[in-house]
Image (cartoon, rainbow, N blue to C red):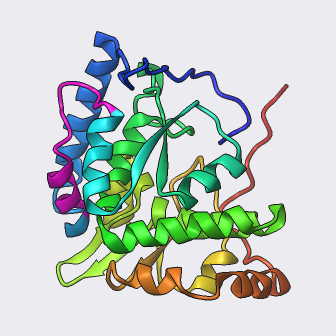
Amino acid sequence: MSKSSKYVSRQSDETGFIAWSDEENQIWHELISRQLSVIEGKACDEYMAGLQKLQLPTDRIPQLEEVSKVLRATTGWECAEVPALISFDKFFELLANKRFPVATFIRSREEFDYLQEPDIFHEIFGHCAMLTNPAFAEFTHIYGKLGLAANKQDRVYLARLYWFTIEFGLLKTEKGLRIYGGGILSSPGETTYALGSDIPERKPFDALDVLRTPYRIDIMQPIYFLIERIDQLFDIAHLDMMTLVEQAKALGLHAPKFPPKEKQAS
């Protein structure tokens, strides 16, 4: 949902089939093979159970219907084919209707390790396994409904809730910290950094705190929020979130834990 994209999504045919090139399938193969080994012992059990249900192919990019079929059977969700960029209105409308937006392009080799725009690998590998989990699915659905009804200013606050849970959430378990956020799970560098580095701060989840915490999309995160169990997402989903947004606006944002982004020379 950034302002411009150099990527163009592939269009499906009348049957919903997308004809990916051999090179695109090879990039998927290399991405998923690498990340499956990186997340071992780091992803939460609920994510790994979701991956088991999805049975994602490793030799080719999955068709969206293959993923949707599993999501419908588990939580009533499905994938929605979208262009590389969609509006916030469209984004929230899809989530409110249990349709997870998947941009149908895959990153280039030049951006193999990191790209700012969510591609099909990020969306499917990072998020869809968790969407088989009832608590995660419910949280994402309610979030979509909140965002759809919110005004532009309030959506900026709600974006922080999404960022620190669905994208960059961590889970405390008896075996130690585990990852459930798709922004971490689809990134080899962030997976290792989020759990293995002593640089970032890790705080217990507090909704008001989260709504007041600035973030940047183009750096390793300086702060992560921890939930105690995945089912805590049910509880968070049913908080009076818009009242908390009003409180966050009144209190103001926390000081950022990162330097300001350098302006690009024009």
* Left or right side of 105 for 156: right
Which residue shows up at 74% across the image and 74% down it?
A: 255
Q: Residue 169's image quarter?
A: bottom left
Which residue shows up at 47% across the image and 50% down it?
A: 100
Q: Position of residue 119 (x, y in %)?
A: 47, 35
Q: Position of residue 171 (x, y in %)?
A: 34, 75
Count of numbered labels shown in the rendering = 0
Q: Residue 69's image quarter?
A: top left
Q: Is residue 79 visible?
A: yes
* Above or below for 177 versus 30: below
* Left or right side of 189 for 62: left
Q: Residue 266's image quarter?
A: top right
Q: Is residue 257 visible?
A: no
Extreme residue in the front direction: 14
Magenta segment: does it hold 145?
A: no
In-front residue for pair 151/125 = 151
* Left or right side of 175 for 244: right
* Left or right side of 26 for 182: right
In-front residue for pair 50/225 = 50
Magenta segment: does it hold 53?
A: yes
Q: Say which quadrant the N terminus sits in.
A: top right
Which residue shows up at 26% across the image and 38% down it?
A: 66
In-front residue for pair 81/253 = 81
Q: Position of residue 163 (x, y in %)?
A: 56, 62
Q: Position of residue 187 (x, y in %)?
A: 38, 46
* Above or below for 212 versus 29: below
Which residue shows up at 66% across the image and 47% down it?
A: 90
In-front residue for pair 187/22 = 22
Which segment did they paint magenta?
A: 47-63
